[in-house]
Image (tube, helix red, strand yellow):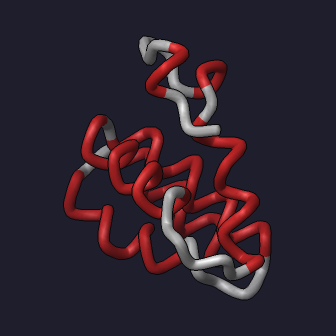
Amino acid sequence: MRTVAAAALGNLGSPAAIATLNQMLLHDTIEVRLAAAEALTKVGDAGIKTLRYATRSDDEKPNRWPCNSFTNKALLPGTEKNDAVD
């Protein structure tokens, strides 16, 4: 249910969804975290900035690592290689 909600929020493309999607990045299940990360990429520059910040966190919680796949060049068209998060 939450994965569907995250996808719907992303499809809206509204920056108003960023706070909710950011919280979903901390959800217990990987499916919800991945859906939230993908949805943030659909919100635009502000969503991508939020996702990059979340993946650059010094917090080493294991529930953060799946989001890194959404910050590479292939999934963020228009970004230069040096802008991608490793």
Q: Could you tell me which residue is drawn at 48 percent across and 57 percent down?
A: 8
Instruction: Check the picture and name the quadrant holding the N terminus.
Output: bottom right
Quarter-wise, where is residue 20 in the image?
Answer: bottom left
Q: Is residue 11 above or below residue 81?
A: below
Q: Could you tell me which residue is drawn at 53 percent across and 64 percent down?
A: 6
Q: Toward the viewer: 20 or 53?
A: 53
In the visual, does 51 lie left or right of 13?
Answer: right
Q: Position of residue 83 (x, y in %)?
A: 44, 26
Q: Position of residue 14 (x, y in %)?
A: 25, 50
Tally of numbered tags: 0
- Residue positioned most to the left: 16
Q: Toward the viewer: 75 or 2?
A: 75
Q: Could you tell me which residue is drawn at 73 percent across and 87 percent down?
A: 28
Q: Is residue 18 above or below residue 49?
A: below
In the visual, does 61 lie left or right of 25?
Answer: right
Q: Toward the viewer: 11 or 33?
A: 33
Q: Could you tell me which residue is drawn at 28 percent across and 36 percent down?
A: 45
Instruction: Check the picture and name the quadrant holding the C terminus.
Output: top right
Q: Position of residue 34 (x, y in %)?
A: 69, 59
